[in-house]
Amino acid sequence: MRYTHYAIFLAITLACAPALADPLSSAAGRYKIDPASHIGFSIEQVAGPGIKGTIQDITGRFDIDADQPAKSYVEISLNPASVKTGQARVESFLTSSAVFNIAAYPQITFRSKSVVQDGPRSALVEGILTARGVSRPETFYATFMDQKTGSVTFHVTGNIPRLPYGMGIGVPLYSNTVAFDMDLKGVR
């Protein structure tokens, strides 16, 4: 009985080994970002709960080149008017001219310049983030999470400073750093 369980475990492990060794090879191609993707953010506060929320309106695409990951590409556009924190007063403040200034700058964009695979399931994605008319190089960390027929999902994190984008109101009471935690689903 033990031998049978071991043999089954070994067979499953060997059958899955190629997929685990190079998960991007079967995911190669162009994907449109699913609007159901999750863009979460948080800003710490010195003596309080800080601000946590999501940006719900997202569009974009990514291309995965499994043979040459450096040729992969990501382009994302966020609508800051879709920010949700669960507090109407905070949402109004974030969309006002003090922070996002959605009347003058209705989009936040990120376009990758470099993708460097740093593990079998992970990569550093460097590119240009544009918010409030300011464009700066920023880096995000992407981890391949899941693949289903016609879709892939990446978990993406990154820490972005607010001050260079003219959104430094409240610093130092509120952190200068916005921590992003995203699940980006791509569909063919």
Image (cartoon, grey):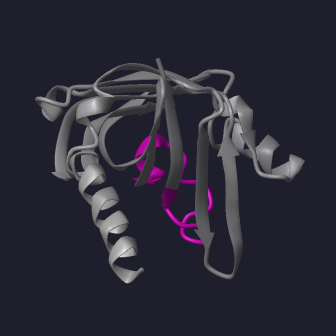
Residue occupying image coordinates x 55% and y 46% = 167
Which span is picked out in magenta?
159-179
Residue 17 in percent (x, y) is at 24, 53
Name the one closer to the observer, 52 or 184.
184
* Residue 88 in view (yes/no): yes
Residue occupying image coordinates x 21% and y 26% = 65
- Is 166 magenta? The answer is yes
Relative placement, left or right, of 130 versus 138 is right
Residue 178 in percent (x, y) is at 51, 56
Residue 186 in percent (x, y) is at 48, 28
Q: Where is the N terminus found, in terms of image quarters?
A: bottom left
Relative placement, left or right, of 87 versus 69 is right
Residue occupying image coordinates x 77% and y 51% = 85
* Residue 121 in view (yes/no): no
Quadrant assignment, res 75: top left
Relative placement, left or right, of 7 versus 152 is left
Name the one closer to the observer, 161 or 53.
53
Q: Farthest right residue? A: 88
Quadrant assignment, res 57: top right
Quadrant assignment, res 6: bottom left
Q: Considering only vertical position in the picture, is 148 above or below 71?
A: below
